[in-house]
Amino acid sequence: MLPREYYDAIQLTPEGQLKHFLTIEGLPPQLLTEILDTADSFVDMNAQQVKKVPLLRGKTVANLFFEASTRTLSTFELAAKRLSADVLNLNISTSSTSKGETLKDTLMTLQAMHCDMFVVRHSASGAAHFIAQHVTPDVAVINAGDGRHAHPTQAMLDMLTIRQHKGDFKNLKVAIVGDILHSRVARSEIHALRILGANEIRVIAPATLLPKHIESLGVKVFTEMSRGLRDVDVVIMLRLQRERMQTALLPSESEFYSLYGLTENKLAYAKPDAIVMHPGPINRGVEIESRVADGPRSVILNQVTNGIAVRMAVMSMAMSGQLNTQSSSFTESSARTESL
Amino acid sequence: MLPREYYDAIQLTPEGQLKHFLTIEGLPPQLLTEILDTADSFVDMNAQQVKKVPLLRGKTVANLFFEASTRTLSTFELAAKRLSADVLNLNISTSSTSKGETLKDTLMTLQAMHCDMFVVRHSASGAAHFIAQHVTPDVAVINAGDGRHAHPTQAMLDMLTIRQHKGDFKNLKVAIVGDILHSRVARSEIHALRILGANEIRVIAPATLLPKHIESLGVKVFTEMSRGLRDVDVVIMLRLQRERMQTALLPSESEFYSLYGLTENKLAYAKPDAIVMHPGPINRGVEIESRVADGPRSVILNQVTNGIAVRMAVMSMAMSGQLNTQSSSFTESSARTESL
Amino acid sequence: MLPREYYDAIQLTPEGQLKHFLTIEGLPPQLLTEILDTADSFVDMNAQQVKKVPLLRGKTVANLFFEASTRTLSTFELAAKRLSADVLNLNISTSSTSKGETLKDTLMTLQAMHCDMFVVRHSASGAAHFIAQHVTPDVAVINAGDGRHAHPTQAMLDMLTIRQHKGDFKNLKVAIVGDILHSRVARSEIHALRILGANEIRVIAPATLLPKHIESLGVKVFTEMSRGLRDVDVVIMLRLQRERMQTALLPSESEFYSLYGLTENKLAYAKPDAIVMHPGPINRGVEIESRVADGPRSVILNQVTNGIAVRMAVMSMAMSGQLNTQSSSFTESSARTESL
C-alpha cells in the first residue's frame, strides 16, 4: 500500500480537483460529497426524455478491459455516450498484447491516438495506478476495478444509494457481508464510509474469508449474521465468486447460504427500515433469498441507476480537472504539440 | 398461441398507437399501412446525402441478441444510429447470463440503466412477449426474431417491397416456398398478407416441412412447384437451415434444389412480371439459382434497403407510442422517479 | 500486377480526385501531397479540445476486417467517429460468410443498407481492388491492408512523419529493414517514396526475405546493416511476423536481432539526425532495441498520431470525390433510386 499522500498527489490537481479516479483512499470528504452531488444531477438528467449532455463532446474515451465484465463495461459505455464522447471499446485480452506488445506500448499508442480518458479494468491490484503513472498528463484514468484493490465507482454508487435513502451518514451502522478477503468492492466501500463519517462499519464473513488485520481499516468484525446484522441501517451483500468454491476457502454453496445468505429471517436482525444492497449480478439462493432481493427493502436496481450517474460524474469531473491542469501549463503543452 | 385480444393489449396504447412490435398477428390493417407509409419516408431519407434524423436523440437502444445474427443486428444498429439513438450491443450468450444471472435480472438491470428500447432476438418462441410483459411501461420492445414464432420486421420489409413493386395487395397471389415448418418469417408474412388483404396466399413445401393445420392460417397448401407457382405475382423463397439436413426432415441439398430450388425454369410457371424475394443470406444453388437471384425479377437487395427503413419506422413509432403513454400517466411515472 | 492506368482509372475521378484509396502505385505526386497537406490540418484538429468535424455526418462507414487487427481497426474507427460518421464494425470471419454467403453477396447487402464507405482488411492480395470493382459507384473503398500487396494508409502516415521531420523528400536517403518479402507496408512505402521523389530508397534484409526482382521497383538492395544504413536520413524497421520463424525463411529471433535488429550501435551508421520508424506493434529485442525505440530519434508514436490524421484525410477526400462523381452523373443515380 502506498502512503496516503501519494494518492492525493496522483489523483488530484494542485487545486484539489479530481484528475484521475483510482481509489477512494485518501480523498477528502468534500470531494466525495461533490461527486455525490454531481451524480445526483445526472440521476435527474437520466430520467429526462433526452439523456444527452455535451460535456465530453469531441473527447475520446477508451474502455480498456483486461478482465471481461459486460455489465460494468455497459455502464461506462452508456455514461460516456450520454456525455457525448466518442467511445472505443478494447477487449485487450484479444488484441495486440497477444502479439507480444507490452502494456506500456499499448498505452502509449492509445494516447498517441489522442484518447482523452482510459477506463481500466484489470485482474492485477495496482494496474490503474500503474497506468495513471505512465500516461501523459492530459489523459484521465478511471479505475473500473483492479484485482483485490479497489472499485471506487462501485463504492460511490453505493454511497449515493445510501444517501438517497438515509440522508446523512453520521448515524448509520453499515454491515458488509460475504467474501471480504477477495473483494475490491468491500475495500472501497470501507474507505468511502469512513471518509463520509459513517457511525459504524461492520464486516461479516467466515474467518477464512476475512483478510488479516482488517480491523486496522476501522471496521468491527463479525462471523455470525445474528450478531453482525443487529440494528444495522444498511446491509451490503457481496457477490460470491463461485470459482472460489473449488478451493478450501469456502464451504458448499448451500452451507454458505444457510450461514451467510441474506434471508428474510436473518434480515429481521437489522433495523426495520434497513436497506439491502448488492453490486450484482446476484446469485439467487446463494448470497440472497429472492424474496429479499425483490422485496421492498432492496435497493439493488437503484444501485444500477446510480451507477450510470456516478460514472458520468467522475468522468466529467476528471476531464474537467485535466483541462484545468492543461490550461495552467499552457507553455509546456503547446511546446509538446509543436514537436509532433 | 395467445388470443388476438392479448396482442392488441400488449402491443398498442389505448389510442391504438404502437408501443411494442412483437408480432404482426392481431394488428389492424391501418397500423400496418401506417408502418409502410412511415418506412417509405425513411427510404427517401436513406437515399439522401445526410442519413440522420434526431427522432431518437438522447434515447438508448439496447440490442439483446441471445441468438447471433450479424446481418439483422447490423440493420437494427444502423437504423438506431440514423435515428440518432445511443446504441448498446449486447451479445448475451457471452455476458452475465453466463455468470448465472437470470434473464429477468438482466432485463431489470438494463432498464435501471434507463435503456428506452430493447431489440430482442432469441431462439425461444415467445421470448419477446415475455420480455415485453416484464419490462417497465416506458421501455419499448422490438422482436427481431423469436424461435419459430415471429419475425415481424422481416415481414413488414417484405410487405413494403411488394407494395413498391405491385401497389395494392388486393389482387395479388403470393407463394411462400421452403421450410415453412421452422420459419418464423413465413408465419409473420402470412399474418401480414392476410391483414393487408392479399387475394391468395400459398405455401409450397415437402410434406415433412409443413406444420399441421397450416390451412387454418388461411393459406393454400402445395407440395409441387409446378402447381404452386402457377400465376403468382410474388415468390418468397425461405432460407434453408442447413443444420436441418442432418435430420430426417430434409432430403439432400441437391434433391431439395431439384424439387424446390427456384430456377428460371420453375419461375416460368409464375406470372411474367412476378417478383422474387428472399430474406437472405441466400444459399446459391440450394434455394435459388444464381441467374434468378441476380436476375431482373429479383428484388432481394431492395428488401435489404427496405429493412433499414422499416426498422427505423417501427422504432420511431414504438418510441412515440411509449412517450404518449407516459405523458398520459404522468402521476404514476413521476412518483416512480421520486422513489429512486 | 495490373498496369498503372488501371489504378488511375479505378481510384480517381475523371477530374483526378480520389474516390477509392487502394494503392499508392500510379497516383500522381500532387495527390500524395494533397493527402499530406489535408492530414496536416487533421493533426492540428486532433490536438484541439474538441476533436470532431462534421465532414462525414450522416454517412455510414463499414469496417470490413476479414483479418483481425485491433490497432488498425481502432484508428479507422476513431478517424470515422471524429469525422462524425456512423460506424459499423464487422468482424467478417464470425459473420454471415460463415453461413455460406459469398463475399459479393455480403458486399451487395452492405451497400443496399446504404453504407457509404468500406474500410477493408483482407489476407488476400487484391481483395480491396476486387471489392472496389464490385461496389456500386457511390461507395468509397479504403484499403486497410491486403495480403502482401499494399497498405497505403500506413505508407502515407509514414510519409507525413518523414515530411514533418525532414521537410522535402528530394535529398533523403531512406532504408527499409526486415522482412521485405512478406511486407505490404514495404511495397506501399517504396511506391510513395518514389512518387514523392526521395533521393535513394534502400531495402536491407537477408536474401531469403527479399522478393525477386525487387530492384525493378527502383530500390538499392543490401544484406548488411553496416553498409545499408550508411548515411541514411530515415530508418524504417518492419514488423517481424513471428509465425515465419517456424519456416526455413528465418533464422532464430536472436540471430535475426544480432544481424538486423536496430541497436544504438547499428544506428550509428546512419546520419546523426536520422529518424527511426516502425509501424508497430514493436517486438522489443527482436526488430529493435528498447533504447532506440524509446530514444530521442524514434518517431514511432508520431506515426500513430499521424495515422489518425492520414485516415481522416483519405476518408474525407474519397467521400468528397464520390459525391462529386454522383452529382455529375445525376440522371443515372436518380433513375437507380427510383427503381428501388
Image: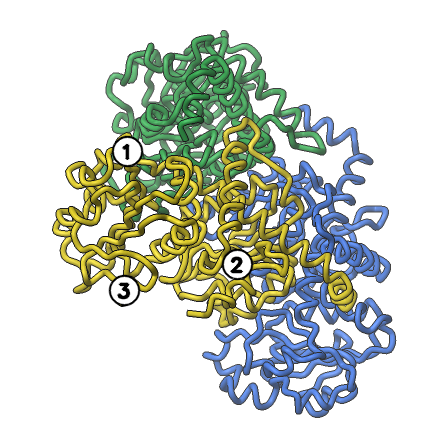
Chain colours: A yellow, B green, C blue
- Label 3 element class: loop
Residue C322: image location, x then y, percent: 75, 42
Both on one chain, marks 3 and 2?
no
In this rendering, which labeled residue sits more in front, label 1 or label 3?
A: 1
Residue at the location (82% across, 67% down)?
A: C195
Q: Identify the residue position indicated by label 3 in the image.
A: A211
Which three-letter amino acid code belongs to the residue tagged 1? Asp
**Given contact means CB atoms under 8 Å apart, are the residues at marks 1 and 3 in contact?**
no
Report the Cα–Cα distance between label 1 and label 3.
Answer: 30 Å
Q: Say whether residue B291 is visible.
A: no
Both on one chain, marks 2 and 1?
no
Q: Identify the residue position indicated by label 1 in the image.
A: A273
**Mark 1 Cα shell of 10 Å, populated few (<14), some (14-19), many (≥20):** some
Residue at the location (52% across, 12% down)?
A: B33
Report the Cα–Cα distance between label 3 and label 2.
Answer: 46 Å
Host chain of mark 2: C
- Label 1 element class: loop
Which three-letter amino acid code belongs to the residue tagged 2? Glu
Residue B215: image location, x then y, percent: 30, 14
Residue at the location (48% across, 25% down)?
A: B267
Host chain of mark 3: A
